[in-house]
């Protein structure tokens, strides 16, 4: 008998995430396929465009993290034209970038991942969203979140021209100087950000870490994968979002590789599967061994947990204290619990806020020399940043006029794609028995998803990141046995899974 | 009296249009007080079946962002068209095709070849491509087939109004919502933004000579840019003369030239054509060879003049119409 369960709205399931679960002859799960079913082809239509347009064109890969693409592209232009940004430009860029990281992480905590924990796994579904968060923590806090987001985004608009989509990036500099009175405003917003981040970390402590059930959930084997980790570090191997060397650690926490942007092709490769438009990254020198854990497999992870795992510390004092507490509680390094990403993200929120304050106070911020003008002949350029969702690489080759002949983009979520696929498969195998499934399956999958905060828009250079899901179960003769659907979106997709995860845990 | 029902849906987009709604910030509370959002997948939990169950025209207005490039998006556009009294194309992709529309410069096969074979980090010895259907040990898994062409919304369904921009400026969204609520809407087919070129009232307009003539086009990354002076007068390719205003001169205030994301004013059928003729009239030469040499300095005319509007342009409107037979209104 074919049972057809529709849990949730169809929204854009064709265009977003899709999971096909295939059963074997015994009715057990053979494999679950996490698919991304769309492609926009930025790498192709970048060809023929002037390189200097890349910061503005590639930001359209993602309207949620446009600054990450804008900045990776701008840094690739620095490299293309072999020119260092003027010192003031570096400060302006880093201030804009840390403000963006702060704002994006705050959005995730309060609007996306947070509702699961703050409102609680057993709360009614219509409360498991940002409004539920406001109800739980108070209207005043809700207003504070909205006001903070607006202040941060206004600061980005001021520095970058537009917040969706920035325009200030030029090789060797930025387009616009910061005025003295604007610096005062930036310092004010940065102070507010530090206070806000400390408040948020405190809330995370009170609501999540003091709750034994939540901590048990975070450390449960269902959400644990032994893989390599990757992230940018500064010269002292501390977390850096804007610049540095790429560091990779083994599942045991040993440094496996440490390399500069220009060497990325020696270390990172992408694997193609016929059943998804998303390519799967892996460590080239370990090799692609399928969707397997380390040590045999080159699958690795990026994003907040990975960044903390590859770093020896944080660049700012308050974040450093939080980092020590994190590994003191869950350690030793590396921590393999995917859900610990939520905690790591709040620590990074504090780091980004402290960085904002340091940068906003720099006398260089208002220095009028904001550009070095390129004179070199362009040929090839590579730029790397840490996007909120992980390591992001832009690589361009051009003709002598600086017109793009090749563009290669390795995007945050793509780095995590194999590990996400593994999480999906594990959840399916654990929870689907005899072809039967309920909401709990989707629930468990979503809990894992939310921690990665996947952005499939970035990953396929195609779509935005708030992903509806379609889960279909097929028997060996390709007859549809079961179908579960779920909408994407800020509050729904992000807010709903927890209840069912809670139910599953019982 | 019940509040007017409003929908907000996304097709092939980057998510920036959704962020622009969230950027209403505190004002979103006023909006929520004035209208009922009955379909807003990114923020609220309503089902497609809820939309299907609505009477035709039940929604006072529905905004759709993103370009159209799949059967599912076409189906949703048609469904929402039926259910909404007013259908609004929201943002540059829906309005004109947007930056993803640049894919129309290439065919689908060459896009797949670049992404899955030619990019230098791709390791694909079997030359595998994503397939509509893949045999696996116990069955098969499927992927949708991509459309050959990217389209603007009005190439798929009739559109009543347009809110332009990439992303639309928050003020335009506020003004549009106010117009919907008071019923004070302009004639159908209008773009809900000032019908004036960006150049008019530009803060740098006083430094634009009356008889502006350009000797040479400059690329912004290779020259210093005076932060006060008209960008065109400096020789930078600022598309302000051809582009609709309403953005608050955001790019120009950041000392970068306008790239045309709000599209043309109402008198213009083809944005790129208008932009090119506006610039051609500024060329300071009557010598053909000299003019040709100057135009050579514009290294990417297609990507420069049609950056946000290739699918909607006269170049592609016809090609797009023939490419996907299933995609057109009967």
Image (cartoon, coloured by chain):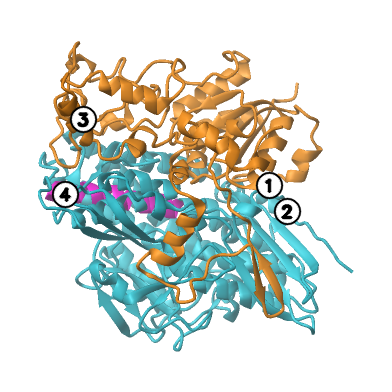
Image coordinates for residue A244, horizontal then vertical, percent: 23, 66
Q: Name the residue under label 4.
A: A172
* Local crowd size for mark 3, using a 10 Å CA cut-off: few (<14), some (14–19), many (≥20): few
As drawn, the label of residue B45 is: 1
Image coordinates for residue A357, horizontal then vertical, percent: 25, 50
- What colour denotes chain A? cyan
The quadrant where residue A21 appears: bottom right
Give the residue drawn at x 39%, y 55%: A43
Q: Which of marks 1 and 3 is nearer the N terminus?
A: 1
Q: Which of marks 2 and 4 is nearer the N terminus?
A: 2
Q: Tell me the subunit letter for badge 2.
A: A
Dot in front, 4 or 3: 3
Residue segment shown in magenta: A85-106
**Whether residue A148 is situated above or below residue A351 in the rendered picture:** above
Q: Which of A44 and B208 is in front in this view?
A: A44
- Asked if residue A97 is among those painted magenta in the image, a careful observer would answer yes
- What colour denotes chain B? orange
Dot in front, 1 or 3: 3
């Amino acid at each position: 008998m074919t049972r057809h369960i529709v849990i949730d709205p169809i929204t854009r399931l064709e265009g977003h995430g899709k999971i096909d679960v295939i059963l074997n002859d015994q009715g057990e799960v053979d494999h679950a396929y996490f698919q991304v079913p769309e492609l926009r082809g930025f790498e192709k239509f970048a060809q023929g465009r002037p390189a200097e347009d890349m910061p503005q064109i590639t930001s359209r890969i993602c309207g949620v993290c446009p600054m990450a693409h804008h900045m990776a592209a701008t840094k690739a232009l620095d490299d293309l034209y072999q020119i260092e940004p003027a010192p003031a430009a570096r400060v302006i860029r880093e201030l804009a970038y840390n403000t963006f990281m702060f704002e994006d992480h705050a959005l995730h905590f309060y609007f996306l991942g947070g509702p699961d924990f703050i409102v609680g796994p057993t709360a009614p579904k219509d409360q498991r969203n940002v409004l539920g968060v406001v109800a739980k923590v108070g209207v005043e806090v809700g207003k504070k979140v909205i006001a903070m987001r607006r202040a941060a985004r206004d600061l980005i608009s001021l520095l970058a021209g537009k917040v969706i989509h920035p325009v200030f990036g030029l090789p060797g500099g930025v387009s616009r100087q910061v005025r003295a009175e604007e610096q005062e405003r930036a310092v004010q917003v940065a102070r507010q950000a530090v206070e806000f981040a400390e408040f948020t970390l405190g809330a995370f402590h009170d609501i999540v870490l003091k709750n034994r059930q939540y901590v048990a959930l975070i450390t449960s084997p269902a959400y644990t994968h032994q893989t390599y980790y990757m992230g940018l570090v500064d010269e002292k191997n501390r977390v850096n979002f804007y610049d540095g060397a790429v560091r990779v650690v083994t599942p045991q926490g040993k440094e496996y590789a440490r390399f500069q942007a220009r060497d990325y092709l020696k270390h990172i490769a992408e694997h193609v599967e016929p059943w998804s438009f998303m390519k799967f990254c892996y460590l080239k020198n370990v090799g692609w061994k399928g969707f397997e854990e380390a040590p045999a497999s080159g699958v690795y992870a990026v994003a907040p947990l990975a960044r903390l795992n590859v770093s020896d510390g944080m660049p700012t004092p308050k974040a450093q204290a939080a980092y020590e507490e994190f590994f003191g509680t869950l350690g030793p390094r590396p921590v393999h619990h995917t859900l610990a990403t939520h905690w790591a993200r709040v620590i990074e929120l504090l780091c980004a806020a402290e960085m904002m304050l340091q940068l906003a106070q720099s006398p260089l911020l208002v220095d009028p020399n904001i550009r070095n003008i390129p004179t070199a002949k362009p040929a090839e350029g590579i730029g790397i940043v840490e996007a909120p969702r992980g390591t992001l690489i832009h690589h361009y080759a051009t003709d002598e006029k600086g017109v793009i002949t090749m563009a290669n983009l390795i995007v945050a979520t793509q780095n995590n794609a194999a590990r996400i696929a593994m999480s999906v498969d594990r959840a399916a195998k654990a929870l689907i028995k005899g072809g039967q499934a309920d909401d709990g399956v989707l629930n468990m999958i979503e809990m894992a998803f939310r921690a990665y905060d996947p952005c499939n828009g970035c990953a396929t250079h195609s779509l935005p990141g708030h992903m509806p899901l379609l889960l279909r179960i097929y028997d060996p003769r390709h007859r549809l046995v079961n179908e579960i659907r779920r909408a994407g979106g800020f509050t729904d997709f992000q807010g709903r899974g927890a209840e069912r995860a809670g139910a599953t845990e019982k | 009296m019940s509040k007017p029902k409003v929908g907000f849906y996304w097709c092939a987009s980057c998510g920036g249009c959704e962020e622009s709604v969230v950027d209403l910030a505190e004002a979103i509370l006023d909006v929520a007080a004035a209208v009922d959002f009955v379909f807003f997948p990114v923020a609220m939990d309503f089902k497609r079946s809820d939309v299907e169950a609505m009477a035709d025209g039940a929604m006072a207005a529905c905004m759709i962002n993103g370009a159209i490039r799949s059967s599912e998006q076409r189906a949703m556009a048609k469904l929402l068209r039926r259910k909404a009294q007013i259908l609004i194309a929201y943002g540059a992709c829906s309005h004109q095709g947007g930056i993803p529309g640049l894919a129309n410069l290439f065919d689908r096969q060459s896009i797949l070849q670049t992404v899955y074979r030619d990019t230098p980090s791709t390791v694909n010895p079997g030359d595998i491509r994503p397939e509509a259907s893949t045999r696996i040990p116990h069955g098969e898994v499927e992927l949708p087939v991509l459309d050959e062409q990217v389209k603007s919304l009005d190439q798929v369904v009739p559109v009543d109004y347009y809110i332009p921009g990439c992303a639309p400026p928050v003020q335009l969204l506020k003004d549009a919502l106010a117009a919907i609520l008071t019923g004070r809407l302009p004639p159908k087919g209008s773009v809900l933004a000032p019908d004036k070129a960006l150049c008019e009232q530009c803060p740098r307009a006083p430094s634009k000579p009356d008889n502006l003539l350009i000797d040479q086009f400059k690329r912004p990354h290779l020259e210093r840019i005076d932060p006060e002076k008209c960008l065109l007068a400096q020789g930078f390719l600022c598309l302000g003369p051809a582009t609709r205003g309403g953005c608050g001169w955001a790019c120009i205030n950041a000392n970068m030239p306008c790239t045309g994301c709000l599209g043309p004013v109402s008198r213009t059928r083809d944005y790129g054509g208008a932009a090119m003729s506006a610039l051609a009239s500024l060329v300071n030469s009557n010598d053909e060879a000299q003019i040709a040499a100057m135009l050579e300095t514009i290294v990417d005319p297609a990507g420069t003049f049609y950056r946000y509007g290739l699918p909607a342009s006269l170049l592609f409107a016809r090609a797009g119409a023939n490419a996907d037979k299933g995609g057109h209104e009967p």
